[in-house]
Amino acid sequence: MKLKQFLTDHREKMQLIYGIFLIVLIPLLIAYNAITIIGRYNDNMDTTLQRETLSEGRSIYAFLQDYLDDTDMIQRKIEDLQDKNSAFEGIEVLMPEDGGYKIVASSEKDNIGKISKFYFYDIAWKQPDKDGLTTDSLKLSMDTDTEMTQATDAEERVWIVAMPMRDRNDTLKAILSVKVSSKIIDDLTSESQRESFIVLIITIIITIFFLLVTVKIWDYVLLYDKIKELDQLKDEFISIASHELRTPLTAIKGYTSIILEGTFGPITDKNMKQSLERVMSSSKKLEDLVEDLLNVSRLEQGRLTVEMTDLQLEPAIEEVVAQLSVTADEKNLKLTFEKPDQPLPLISADKDRLGQVLVNLIGNSIKYTEKGSVTVSTEVKDDEMRIKVNDTGIGISPEAQKRLFQKFYRVQTEKTEKIHGTGLGLWITKQIVELMNGHIYVDSIEGQGTQFMVTLKLSTMKKA
Ligand code: ADP
Protein backbone atom coordinates (compact mmCIF):
# COMPACT_ATOMS: atom_id res chain seq x y z
CA MET A 1 0.00 0.00 0.00
CA LYS A 2 2.90 2.30 0.91
CA LEU A 3 4.63 1.45 -2.37
CA LYS A 4 1.45 2.23 -4.30
CA GLN A 5 1.18 5.58 -2.51
CA PHE A 6 4.84 6.31 -3.22
CA LEU A 7 4.39 5.47 -6.91
CA THR A 8 1.30 7.67 -7.13
CA ASP A 9 3.04 10.58 -5.40
CA HIS A 10 6.16 10.35 -7.54
CA ARG A 11 4.49 9.20 -10.72
CA GLU A 12 6.15 11.74 -13.03
CA LYS A 13 9.62 11.17 -11.58
CA MET A 14 9.17 7.40 -11.74
CA GLN A 15 8.06 7.64 -15.37
CA LEU A 16 11.11 9.75 -16.19
CA ILE A 17 13.48 7.31 -14.49
CA TYR A 18 11.73 4.39 -16.16
CA GLY A 19 12.03 6.09 -19.58
CA ILE A 20 15.72 6.88 -19.14
CA PHE A 21 16.36 3.38 -17.80
CA LEU A 22 14.77 1.87 -20.93
CA ILE A 23 16.61 4.21 -23.25
CA VAL A 24 19.97 3.30 -21.73
CA LEU A 25 19.20 -0.38 -21.28
CA ILE A 26 17.86 -1.17 -24.77
CA PRO A 27 20.91 0.09 -26.74
CA LEU A 28 23.24 -1.44 -24.13
CA LEU A 29 21.60 -4.83 -24.53
CA ILE A 30 21.73 -4.57 -28.30
CA ALA A 31 25.40 -3.55 -28.16
CA TYR A 32 26.22 -6.35 -25.72
CA ASN A 33 24.43 -8.85 -27.95
CA ALA A 34 26.24 -7.68 -31.08
CA ILE A 35 29.66 -7.69 -29.40
CA THR A 36 29.23 -11.18 -27.91
CA ILE A 37 28.00 -12.66 -31.19
CA ILE A 38 30.86 -11.09 -33.15
CA GLY A 39 33.35 -12.19 -30.49
CA ARG A 40 32.14 -15.77 -30.60
CA TYR A 41 32.12 -15.79 -34.36
CA ASN A 42 35.66 -14.42 -34.35
CA ASP A 43 36.85 -17.06 -31.86
CA ASN A 44 35.34 -19.86 -33.94
CA MET A 45 36.95 -18.58 -37.11
CA ASP A 46 40.27 -18.18 -35.30
CA THR A 47 40.24 -21.75 -34.01
CA THR A 48 39.50 -22.99 -37.50
CA LEU A 49 42.36 -20.95 -38.92
CA GLN A 50 44.71 -22.14 -36.21
CA ARG A 51 43.95 -25.78 -37.04
CA GLU A 52 44.27 -25.06 -40.71
CA THR A 53 47.67 -23.44 -40.20
CA LEU A 54 48.88 -26.39 -38.19
CA SER A 55 47.76 -28.91 -40.80
CA GLU A 56 49.33 -26.75 -43.55
CA GLY A 57 52.53 -26.81 -41.50
CA ARG A 58 52.41 -30.62 -41.32
CA SER A 59 51.94 -30.98 -45.07
CA ILE A 60 54.81 -28.59 -45.78
CA TYR A 61 56.97 -30.50 -43.32
CA ALA A 62 56.25 -33.77 -45.16
CA PHE A 63 56.92 -32.05 -48.45
CA LEU A 64 60.33 -30.69 -47.36
CA GLN A 65 61.52 -33.51 -45.11
CA ASP A 66 63.51 -35.29 -47.84
CA TYR A 67 65.57 -32.23 -48.76
CA LEU A 68 66.77 -31.16 -45.35
CA ASP A 69 70.41 -31.54 -46.45
CA ASP A 70 69.93 -29.48 -49.59
CA THR A 71 69.04 -25.91 -48.62
CA ASP A 72 68.86 -24.73 -52.26
CA MET A 73 66.28 -27.35 -52.99
CA ILE A 74 64.30 -26.33 -49.91
CA GLN A 75 64.44 -22.72 -51.05
CA ARG A 76 63.03 -23.67 -54.47
CA LYS A 77 60.28 -25.77 -52.95
CA ILE A 78 59.33 -22.94 -50.60
CA GLU A 79 59.14 -20.46 -53.49
CA ASP A 80 56.95 -22.96 -55.32
CA LEU A 81 54.60 -23.28 -52.36
CA GLN A 82 54.47 -19.54 -51.83
CA ASP A 83 53.53 -18.99 -55.50
CA LYS A 84 50.72 -21.52 -55.33
CA ASN A 85 49.20 -20.36 -52.10
CA SER A 86 48.86 -16.66 -51.40
CA ALA A 87 47.44 -17.24 -47.92
CA PHE A 88 50.97 -17.92 -46.65
CA GLU A 89 52.44 -14.83 -45.18
CA GLY A 90 55.83 -16.51 -45.02
CA ILE A 91 57.53 -19.90 -44.96
CA GLU A 92 60.97 -20.31 -43.48
CA VAL A 93 63.30 -23.11 -42.53
CA LEU A 94 65.77 -22.34 -39.76
CA MET A 95 68.71 -24.30 -38.42
CA PRO A 96 70.42 -23.82 -35.06
CA GLU A 97 73.58 -21.76 -35.20
CA ASP A 98 75.38 -19.29 -32.90
CA GLY A 99 72.95 -19.79 -30.05
CA GLY A 100 70.08 -18.80 -32.36
CA TYR A 101 68.43 -20.07 -35.51
CA LYS A 102 69.80 -19.24 -38.91
CA ILE A 103 67.33 -18.81 -41.74
CA VAL A 104 68.47 -21.21 -44.44
CA ALA A 105 65.49 -20.88 -46.73
CA SER A 106 62.75 -18.31 -46.80
CA SER A 107 59.90 -17.07 -48.96
CA GLU A 108 61.49 -13.65 -48.26
CA LYS A 109 64.86 -14.13 -49.92
CA ASP A 110 66.42 -11.19 -48.05
CA ASN A 111 66.00 -13.00 -44.77
CA ILE A 112 68.24 -15.89 -45.78
CA GLY A 113 71.34 -16.02 -43.62
CA LYS A 114 69.88 -13.97 -40.81
CA ILE A 115 70.06 -15.36 -37.29
CA SER A 116 66.85 -15.32 -35.24
CA LYS A 117 66.83 -15.53 -31.46
CA PHE A 118 63.06 -15.80 -31.34
CA TYR A 119 62.18 -17.57 -28.04
CA PHE A 120 59.21 -19.26 -29.68
CA TYR A 121 61.61 -21.32 -31.84
CA ASP A 122 63.41 -22.45 -28.71
CA ILE A 123 60.22 -23.88 -27.33
CA ALA A 124 59.28 -25.37 -30.69
CA TRP A 125 62.71 -27.08 -30.94
CA LYS A 126 61.82 -29.14 -27.89
CA GLN A 127 58.40 -30.17 -29.21
CA PRO A 128 57.77 -33.78 -30.27
CA ASP A 129 58.00 -34.39 -34.00
CA LYS A 130 55.21 -32.87 -36.11
CA ASP A 131 53.40 -31.49 -33.10
CA GLY A 132 54.43 -27.93 -33.70
CA LEU A 133 53.35 -24.84 -31.85
CA THR A 134 50.87 -22.26 -32.99
CA THR A 135 50.35 -18.79 -31.72
CA ASP A 136 49.19 -15.52 -33.13
CA SER A 137 51.16 -12.33 -33.44
CA LEU A 138 48.78 -10.49 -31.15
CA LYS A 139 49.50 -12.92 -28.35
CA LEU A 140 53.20 -12.71 -28.99
CA SER A 141 53.18 -8.95 -28.81
CA MET A 142 51.59 -9.21 -25.37
CA ASP A 143 54.36 -11.51 -24.17
CA THR A 144 57.66 -10.37 -22.71
CA ASP A 145 60.46 -8.43 -24.34
CA THR A 146 61.43 -11.16 -26.73
CA GLU A 147 62.79 -10.54 -30.15
CA MET A 148 59.76 -10.52 -32.30
CA THR A 149 60.87 -9.02 -35.54
CA GLN A 150 60.54 -12.39 -37.14
CA ALA A 151 56.98 -12.84 -36.10
CA THR A 152 55.39 -9.47 -36.05
CA ASP A 153 56.81 -7.47 -38.90
CA ALA A 154 53.63 -8.16 -40.85
CA GLU A 155 51.08 -5.35 -40.66
CA GLU A 156 48.15 -7.65 -40.02
CA ARG A 157 47.67 -10.32 -37.46
CA VAL A 158 49.28 -13.62 -38.42
CA TRP A 159 49.15 -17.17 -37.17
CA ILE A 160 52.57 -18.69 -36.67
CA VAL A 161 53.37 -22.40 -36.68
CA ALA A 162 56.81 -23.48 -35.53
CA MET A 163 57.63 -27.17 -35.98
CA PRO A 164 60.78 -29.16 -35.31
CA MET A 165 61.94 -31.01 -38.45
CA ARG A 166 63.73 -34.34 -38.48
CA ASP A 167 65.34 -35.94 -41.48
CA ARG A 168 64.69 -39.52 -42.54
CA ASN A 169 67.34 -40.70 -40.03
CA ASP A 170 65.31 -39.11 -37.29
CA THR A 171 67.90 -36.46 -36.56
CA LEU A 172 66.57 -33.13 -35.39
CA LYS A 173 67.73 -30.78 -38.09
CA ALA A 174 65.68 -27.66 -38.47
CA ILE A 175 62.67 -25.63 -37.57
CA LEU A 176 59.87 -24.96 -39.98
CA SER A 177 58.12 -21.64 -39.54
CA VAL A 178 54.88 -20.99 -41.38
CA LYS A 179 52.92 -17.77 -41.07
CA VAL A 180 49.34 -17.53 -42.24
CA SER A 181 47.60 -14.18 -42.42
CA SER A 182 44.35 -13.81 -40.49
CA LYS A 183 43.43 -10.86 -42.65
CA ILE A 184 40.31 -12.46 -44.16
CA ILE A 185 38.91 -13.23 -40.74
CA ASP A 186 39.90 -9.90 -39.30
CA ASP A 187 38.36 -8.12 -42.28
CA LEU A 188 35.16 -10.10 -41.88
CA THR A 189 35.07 -9.34 -38.17
CA SER A 190 35.66 -5.66 -38.61
CA GLU A 191 32.98 -5.57 -41.32
CA SER A 192 30.51 -7.23 -38.94
CA GLN A 193 31.53 -4.79 -36.27
CA ARG A 194 30.94 -1.88 -38.63
CA GLU A 195 27.50 -3.22 -39.56
CA SER A 196 26.58 -3.78 -35.94
CA PHE A 197 27.73 -0.28 -35.12
CA ILE A 198 25.42 1.13 -37.82
CA VAL A 199 22.51 -0.96 -36.48
CA LEU A 200 23.34 0.30 -33.00
CA ILE A 201 23.32 3.94 -34.11
CA ILE A 202 19.94 3.41 -35.87
CA THR A 203 18.57 1.77 -32.72
CA ILE A 204 19.73 4.68 -30.60
CA ILE A 205 18.10 7.16 -32.99
CA ILE A 206 14.84 5.17 -32.90
CA THR A 207 15.05 5.03 -29.12
CA ILE A 208 15.56 8.79 -28.96
CA PHE A 209 12.48 9.27 -31.16
CA PHE A 210 10.65 6.96 -28.80
CA LEU A 211 11.82 9.15 -25.93
CA LEU A 212 10.51 12.26 -27.67
CA VAL A 213 7.11 10.65 -28.17
CA THR A 214 7.13 9.48 -24.58
CA VAL A 215 7.99 12.98 -23.43
CA LYS A 216 4.88 14.11 -25.31
CA ILE A 217 2.92 11.50 -23.40
CA TRP A 218 4.38 12.94 -20.20
CA ASP A 219 3.10 16.32 -21.34
CA TYR A 220 -0.34 14.80 -21.58
CA VAL A 221 0.09 13.31 -18.14
CA LEU A 222 0.95 16.75 -16.80
CA LEU A 223 -1.97 18.25 -18.68
CA TYR A 224 -4.26 15.60 -17.26
CA ASP A 225 -3.07 16.48 -13.77
CA LYS A 226 -3.67 20.17 -14.44
CA ILE A 227 -7.16 19.48 -15.73
CA LYS A 228 -7.84 17.38 -12.66
CA GLU A 229 -6.58 20.19 -10.48
CA LEU A 230 -8.81 22.69 -12.31
CA ASP A 231 -11.73 20.32 -11.97
CA GLN A 232 -11.10 20.17 -8.25
CA LEU A 233 -10.95 23.97 -8.10
CA LYS A 234 -14.28 24.10 -9.94
CA ASP A 235 -15.77 21.64 -7.47
CA GLU A 236 -14.47 23.69 -4.56
CA PHE A 237 -15.83 26.87 -6.13
CA ILE A 238 -19.28 25.32 -6.60
CA SER A 239 -19.19 24.06 -3.07
CA ILE A 240 -18.22 27.45 -1.59
CA ALA A 241 -20.58 29.41 -3.87
CA SER A 242 -23.51 27.12 -3.03
CA HIS A 243 -22.87 27.47 0.69
CA GLU A 244 -22.66 31.23 0.34
CA LEU A 245 -25.92 31.30 -1.64
CA ARG A 246 -27.74 29.31 0.98
CA THR A 247 -27.56 31.95 3.72
CA PRO A 248 -29.14 34.86 1.81
CA LEU A 249 -31.68 32.46 0.32
CA THR A 250 -32.78 31.33 3.75
CA ALA A 251 -33.21 34.98 4.71
CA ILE A 252 -35.27 35.76 1.60
CA LYS A 253 -37.48 32.71 2.14
CA GLY A 254 -37.82 33.38 5.86
CA TYR A 255 -38.82 37.03 5.51
CA THR A 256 -41.19 36.37 2.58
CA SER A 257 -42.89 33.68 4.59
CA ILE A 258 -43.25 35.99 7.61
CA ILE A 259 -44.72 38.73 5.41
CA LEU A 260 -47.09 36.26 3.73
CA GLU A 261 -48.23 35.01 7.11
CA GLY A 262 -49.22 38.59 7.94
CA THR A 263 -46.82 39.09 10.83
CA PHE A 264 -46.20 42.69 9.71
CA GLY A 265 -49.86 43.31 9.03
CA PRO A 266 -52.40 41.79 6.68
CA ILE A 267 -51.69 41.83 2.94
CA THR A 268 -54.70 43.29 1.36
CA ASP A 269 -53.35 43.95 -2.08
CA LYS A 270 -53.96 40.88 -4.30
CA ASN A 271 -51.09 41.73 -6.66
CA MET A 272 -48.71 42.19 -3.78
CA LYS A 273 -49.66 38.77 -2.38
CA GLN A 274 -49.22 37.14 -5.78
CA SER A 275 -45.81 38.74 -6.21
CA LEU A 276 -44.69 37.61 -2.80
CA GLU A 277 -45.87 34.08 -3.54
CA ARG A 278 -43.78 34.13 -6.73
CA VAL A 279 -40.76 35.31 -4.73
CA MET A 280 -41.41 32.40 -2.40
CA SER A 281 -41.68 29.76 -5.12
CA SER A 282 -38.65 31.11 -7.02
CA SER A 283 -36.63 31.04 -3.80
CA LYS A 284 -37.66 27.42 -3.30
CA LYS A 285 -36.52 26.56 -6.83
CA LEU A 286 -33.25 28.35 -6.21
CA GLU A 287 -32.86 26.49 -2.95
CA ASP A 288 -33.40 23.18 -4.75
CA LEU A 289 -30.80 24.12 -7.33
CA VAL A 290 -28.28 25.09 -4.64
CA GLU A 291 -28.99 21.82 -2.86
CA ASP A 292 -28.45 19.87 -6.10
CA LEU A 293 -25.16 21.65 -6.79
CA LEU A 294 -23.98 20.98 -3.26
CA ASN A 295 -24.81 17.31 -3.67
CA VAL A 296 -22.99 17.15 -7.00
CA SER A 297 -19.84 18.66 -5.52
CA ARG A 298 -20.06 16.40 -2.45
CA LEU A 299 -20.43 13.34 -4.69
CA GLU A 300 -17.62 14.36 -7.00
CA GLN A 301 -15.25 15.00 -4.13
CA GLY A 302 -16.29 11.77 -2.45
CA ARG A 303 -17.53 13.74 0.54
CA LEU A 304 -21.03 12.35 0.41
CA THR A 305 -21.03 9.45 2.80
CA VAL A 306 -23.79 7.00 3.61
CA GLU A 307 -24.61 5.63 7.00
CA MET A 308 -26.11 2.21 6.40
CA THR A 309 -28.61 0.99 8.93
CA ASP A 310 -31.32 -1.66 8.96
CA LEU A 311 -34.58 0.11 8.43
CA GLN A 312 -38.23 -0.36 7.76
CA LEU A 313 -39.13 0.81 4.26
CA GLU A 314 -42.86 1.48 4.65
CA PRO A 315 -42.60 4.55 6.97
CA ALA A 316 -39.92 6.07 4.72
CA ILE A 317 -42.20 5.83 1.68
CA GLU A 318 -45.27 7.01 3.60
CA GLU A 319 -43.40 10.07 4.81
CA VAL A 320 -42.34 11.14 1.32
CA VAL A 321 -45.79 10.39 -0.15
CA ALA A 322 -47.38 12.57 2.53
CA GLN A 323 -44.86 15.33 1.88
CA LEU A 324 -45.46 15.33 -1.88
CA SER A 325 -49.21 14.74 -1.85
CA VAL A 326 -49.80 18.50 -1.69
CA THR A 327 -48.04 18.98 -5.04
CA ALA A 328 -49.81 15.95 -6.51
CA ASP A 329 -53.16 17.31 -5.34
CA GLU A 330 -52.41 20.66 -6.95
CA LYS A 331 -52.04 18.83 -10.28
CA ASN A 332 -55.04 16.62 -9.63
CA LEU A 333 -52.84 13.51 -9.65
CA LYS A 334 -53.61 10.42 -7.64
CA LEU A 335 -50.51 9.66 -5.56
CA THR A 336 -50.69 6.28 -3.82
CA PHE A 337 -48.47 3.88 -1.99
CA GLU A 338 -49.54 0.26 -2.48
CA LYS A 339 -48.57 -0.82 0.99
CA PRO A 340 -48.19 -4.60 1.29
CA ASP A 341 -50.42 -6.42 3.80
CA GLN A 342 -47.48 -8.10 5.49
CA PRO A 343 -44.67 -5.99 6.96
CA LEU A 344 -41.71 -5.85 4.61
CA PRO A 345 -38.30 -7.25 5.62
CA LEU A 346 -35.79 -4.69 6.82
CA ILE A 347 -33.51 -3.15 4.23
CA SER A 348 -29.97 -1.93 4.52
CA ALA A 349 -29.85 1.78 3.63
CA ASP A 350 -29.11 5.33 4.78
CA LYS A 351 -32.39 6.79 6.04
CA ASP A 352 -31.87 10.38 4.86
CA ARG A 353 -30.38 9.39 1.50
CA LEU A 354 -33.22 6.95 0.89
CA GLY A 355 -35.63 9.82 1.56
CA GLN A 356 -33.72 11.95 -0.96
CA VAL A 357 -33.96 9.19 -3.60
CA LEU A 358 -37.70 8.76 -3.04
CA VAL A 359 -38.33 12.54 -3.16
CA ASN A 360 -36.40 12.78 -6.44
CA LEU A 361 -38.19 9.87 -8.13
CA ILE A 362 -41.72 10.56 -6.86
CA GLY A 363 -41.17 14.31 -7.37
CA ASN A 364 -40.12 13.69 -10.99
CA SER A 365 -43.14 11.50 -11.63
CA ILE A 366 -45.44 14.23 -10.37
CA LYS A 367 -43.49 16.83 -12.33
CA TYR A 368 -43.62 14.96 -15.64
CA THR A 369 -47.20 13.67 -15.39
CA GLU A 370 -50.04 15.84 -16.64
CA LYS A 371 -52.93 13.63 -15.64
CA GLY A 372 -53.54 10.27 -14.10
CA SER A 373 -51.60 8.79 -11.25
CA VAL A 374 -48.31 8.16 -9.55
CA THR A 375 -48.03 4.83 -7.73
CA VAL A 376 -45.33 3.57 -5.42
CA SER A 377 -45.07 -0.17 -4.86
CA THR A 378 -42.59 -2.67 -3.46
CA GLU A 379 -41.53 -6.23 -4.16
CA VAL A 380 -39.10 -8.58 -2.48
CA LYS A 381 -37.01 -10.61 -4.85
CA ASP A 382 -34.24 -12.92 -3.57
CA ASP A 383 -32.08 -10.83 -1.26
CA GLU A 384 -33.32 -7.55 -2.77
CA MET A 385 -36.03 -5.05 -2.18
CA ARG A 386 -37.49 -3.50 -5.30
CA ILE A 387 -39.07 -0.07 -5.00
CA LYS A 388 -41.10 0.93 -8.05
CA VAL A 389 -42.41 4.38 -8.92
CA ASN A 390 -44.94 4.23 -11.76
CA ASP A 391 -46.58 7.17 -13.44
CA THR A 392 -48.95 7.81 -16.32
CA GLY A 393 -46.89 10.74 -17.52
CA ILE A 394 -45.25 11.93 -20.71
CA GLY A 395 -42.83 9.00 -20.87
CA ILE A 396 -39.26 8.94 -22.12
CA SER A 397 -38.05 7.89 -25.58
CA PRO A 398 -35.64 4.90 -25.80
CA GLU A 399 -32.80 7.22 -26.98
CA ALA A 400 -33.34 9.58 -24.07
CA GLN A 401 -33.48 6.65 -21.63
CA LYS A 402 -29.89 5.79 -22.54
CA ARG A 403 -28.64 9.22 -21.45
CA LEU A 404 -31.05 9.77 -18.60
CA PHE A 405 -28.57 9.26 -15.75
CA GLN A 406 -25.93 11.59 -17.18
CA LYS A 407 -25.11 14.80 -15.36
CA PHE A 408 -27.10 17.83 -16.63
CA TYR A 409 -29.05 15.72 -19.14
CA ARG A 410 -32.59 16.90 -19.76
CA VAL A 411 -34.99 15.52 -22.33
CA GLN A 412 -35.69 18.22 -24.90
CA THR A 413 -39.25 17.92 -26.20
CA GLU A 414 -42.22 20.23 -26.59
CA LYS A 415 -43.69 18.77 -23.45
CA THR A 416 -40.59 19.25 -21.30
CA GLU A 417 -39.54 22.68 -22.46
CA LYS A 418 -41.89 24.50 -20.07
CA ILE A 419 -40.91 22.34 -17.11
CA HIS A 420 -37.95 23.72 -15.21
CA GLY A 421 -35.10 21.59 -13.99
CA THR A 422 -31.35 21.18 -13.88
CA GLY A 423 -30.87 17.64 -15.20
CA LEU A 424 -29.00 16.81 -11.98
CA GLY A 425 -31.68 14.95 -10.02
CA LEU A 426 -31.38 11.54 -11.69
CA TRP A 427 -27.57 11.67 -11.75
CA ILE A 428 -27.52 12.40 -8.01
CA THR A 429 -30.15 9.69 -7.40
CA LYS A 430 -28.14 7.06 -9.26
CA GLN A 431 -24.93 7.95 -7.38
CA ILE A 432 -26.68 7.74 -4.02
CA VAL A 433 -28.40 4.44 -4.87
CA GLU A 434 -25.07 2.95 -5.90
CA LEU A 435 -23.41 4.24 -2.72
CA MET A 436 -26.08 2.26 -0.86
CA ASN A 437 -25.09 -0.86 -2.90
CA GLY A 438 -28.22 -0.67 -5.02
CA HIS A 439 -29.19 -0.19 -8.66
CA ILE A 440 -31.62 1.97 -10.55
CA TYR A 441 -33.53 1.06 -13.74
CA VAL A 442 -35.92 2.87 -16.00
CA ASP A 443 -38.66 1.53 -18.23
CA SER A 444 -40.88 3.85 -20.18
CA ILE A 445 -43.23 4.21 -23.14
CA GLU A 446 -43.46 7.68 -24.61
CA GLY A 447 -46.90 9.22 -24.04
CA GLN A 448 -47.96 6.42 -21.71
CA GLY A 449 -45.85 6.52 -18.63
CA THR A 450 -42.65 5.63 -16.86
CA GLN A 451 -41.46 3.21 -14.24
CA PHE A 452 -38.34 3.81 -12.18
CA MET A 453 -37.16 0.87 -10.13
CA VAL A 454 -34.61 1.01 -7.34
CA THR A 455 -33.20 -2.17 -5.85
CA LEU A 456 -31.65 -2.21 -2.39
CA LYS A 457 -30.14 -5.04 -0.37
CA LEU A 458 -32.22 -6.63 2.37
CA SER A 459 -30.76 -6.39 5.83
CA THR A 460 -28.51 -9.35 6.60
CA MET A 461 -29.72 -9.19 10.20
CA LYS A 462 -33.20 -10.19 9.09
CA LYS A 463 -31.86 -13.12 7.13
CA ALA A 464 -29.76 -14.47 9.98
P1 ADP B 1 -34.63 17.62 -14.02
O1 ADP B 1 -35.91 17.02 -13.64
O2 ADP B 1 -34.12 18.63 -13.07
O3 ADP B 1 -34.58 18.08 -15.43
P2 ADP B 1 -33.58 14.94 -13.63
O4 ADP B 1 -32.17 14.49 -13.61
O5 ADP B 1 -34.37 14.69 -12.43
O6 ADP B 1 -33.51 16.47 -13.97
O7 ADP B 1 -34.29 14.29 -14.86
C1 ADP B 1 -33.64 14.29 -16.11
C2 ADP B 1 -34.68 14.28 -17.22
O8 ADP B 1 -35.35 13.03 -17.22
C3 ADP B 1 -35.74 15.30 -17.04
O9 ADP B 1 -35.36 16.51 -17.65
C4 ADP B 1 -36.93 14.67 -17.73
O10 ADP B 1 -36.96 15.02 -19.08
C5 ADP B 1 -36.70 13.19 -17.62
N1 ADP B 1 -37.53 12.53 -16.60
C6 ADP B 1 -37.19 12.25 -15.32
N2 ADP B 1 -38.19 11.62 -14.69
C7 ADP B 1 -39.20 11.49 -15.58
C8 ADP B 1 -40.52 10.91 -15.54
N3 ADP B 1 -40.99 10.34 -14.43
N4 ADP B 1 -41.23 10.97 -16.66
C9 ADP B 1 -40.76 11.52 -17.78
N5 ADP B 1 -39.55 12.08 -17.87
C10 ADP B 1 -38.77 12.08 -16.80
Image (cartoon, rainbow, N blue to C red):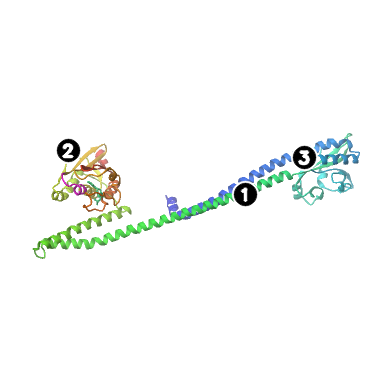
What residue is rendered at 84% in x and 36% in y?
Answer: 63
Q: Nearer the viewer, residue 396 or 70?
A: 396
The residue range painted magenta reads 363-372
Identify the secondary structure beneath mark 3: helix
Q: Residue 342 — which label?
A: 2
Query: Could you give the CA–CA distance between mark 2 and mark 3, rounded to whole angstroms?
Result: 107 Å
Q: Nearer the viewer, mark 1 or mark 3?
A: 1
Q: Earlier in the sequence, mark 2 or mark 1?
A: 1
| Quadrant into which the C terminus falls | top left
Answer few, some or many: residues within 10 Å of disc 2's Cα (few below 14, many 20 plus, some between 14 and 19): few
Mark 2 vs 3, N-terminal side = 3
- Residue 11 as seen in the image, left or right of residue 401: right
Callout 1: helix, strand or loop? helix
What residue is shown at x 89% (from left), y 37% (from top)?
67
Left or right, 314 with respect to 54, comes to left
The answer to whether residue 213 is magenta is: no
Q: Are marks 2 and 3 in contact (CB under 8 Å)?
A: no
Q: Quadrant of residue 38?
A: top right
Q: Position of residue 220 (x, y in %)?
A: 44, 54
Residue ID at (78%, 39%): 54
Q: Secondary structure at mark 2?
A: loop
Is residue 130 shown to the viewer in this render?
A: no
Residue tagged 1: 198
Magenta stretch containing residue 367, yes or no?
Answer: yes
Q: Determine which of the numbered discs, if any, sits on residue 53 in the image.
A: 3
Q: Amino acid at mark 3?
A: Thr
Marks 2/1: CA distance?
85 Å
Camera-near label (2 vs 1) is 1
As drawn, the label of residue 61 is none
